[in-house]
């Protein structure tokens, strides 16, 4: 029985092995390679996507778990223009090697939905890993994105 879901606003269906992790569907079948394989045990966050608007680690999430749900990847985050978090990432020159950045951005978007004005402690609660150690720039960009989102809400 096929698994049906919405992927970046488009109806999607997969008739293969429903126990396959969502990450492999995204990368190998949908050809959306922004989400990365890092650890394969949901610890590093390089594979973070949104499932029904909440951050989820796609490397351990079986396709069967996304039946009827809405998936957003980094490729689907921007609509008419870059998301405020993406703009802040550029403004603050966050990326170094870039491998973890899609997952970092998706986790930050989820955080800012839940906590519009996060403290440093709120930001430190994010568990995505960055081997390059860009945490100070990530924190600065999340604070900047909070300002951008507040400005967007006012206009």
Image (cartoon, rainbow, N blue to C red):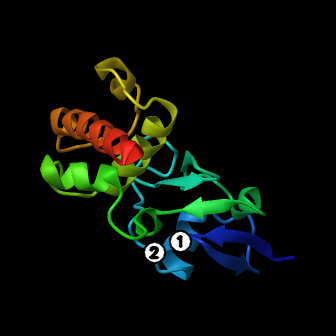
Could you tell me residue 99's position as x and y percent?
27, 57
10 Å crowding of disc 1: few (<14), some (14-19), many (20+): many
> Dot 2 corresponds to which residue?
32
Write down the quadrant of residue 8 in the picture. Answer: bottom right
Quadrant location, the N terminus: bottom right
Q: Nearer the viewer, residue 41 or 74?
A: 74
> Do the residues under discs 1 and 2 have CB atoms within 8 angstroms?
yes
Compared across the picture, whether 107 is left or right of 23 comes to left
Q: At 59% across and 50% down in the image, what residue appears?
A: 53
In the foreground, 138 or 19:
138
Q: Is residue 14 above or below residue 83?
A: below
Any part of residue 100 in sight:
no
Label 2 Cα crowd, 10 Å radius (few <14 / some 14-19 / many 20+): some
Q: Secondary structure at mark 1?
A: helix
Q: Is residue 97 left or right of residue 64?
A: left
Residue 11 at x, y percent in the picture = 68, 77
N-terminal of the pair, mark 1 or mark 2, is 1
Number of callouts in the render?
2
From the viewer's perspective, tell me whether residue 54 is left or right of residue 95: right
Residue toward you, 101 or 1:
101
Q: Position of residue 55 (x, y in %)?
A: 53, 46
Q: CA distance from mark 1 to mark 2?
A: 5 Å
Mark 1 lies on residue: 26
- Name above or below for residue 99 compared with residue 139: below
Of residues 153 and 64, which is closer to you in this image?
Answer: 153
Q: Residue furthest front?
A: 155
- Give percent across and percent down for residue 25: 58, 72
SS at mark 2 in the image: loop
Residue appearing at x 32%, y 37% in the figure: 146
Q: Which residue is found at the position 14% from the left and 46% from the top?
A: 92
Query: Is residue 128 placed above or below 2 in the rendered structure?
Result: above
């Amino acid at each position: 029985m096929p698994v049906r879901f919405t992927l970046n606003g488009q109806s999607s269906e997969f008739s293969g092995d429903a126990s396959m992790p969502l990450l492999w569907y995204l990368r190998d079948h949908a050809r959306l390679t922004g989400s990365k394989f890092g650890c394969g045990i949901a610890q590093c966050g390089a594979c973070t996507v949104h499932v029904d608007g909440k951050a989820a680690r796609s490397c351990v999430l079986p396709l069967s778990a996304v039946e009827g749900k809405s998936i957003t990847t980094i490729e689907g985050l921007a609509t008419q223009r870059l998301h405020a978090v993406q703009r802040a990432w550029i403004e603050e020159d966050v990326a170094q090697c870039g491998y973890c950045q899609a997952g970092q951005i998706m986790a930050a978007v989820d955080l800012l939905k839940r906590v519009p004005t996060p403290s440093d402690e709120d930001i430190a609660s994010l568990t995505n890993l960055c081997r390059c150690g860009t945490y100070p720039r990530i924190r600065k960009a999340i604070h900047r994105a909070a300002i951008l989102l507040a400005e967007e809400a006012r206009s």
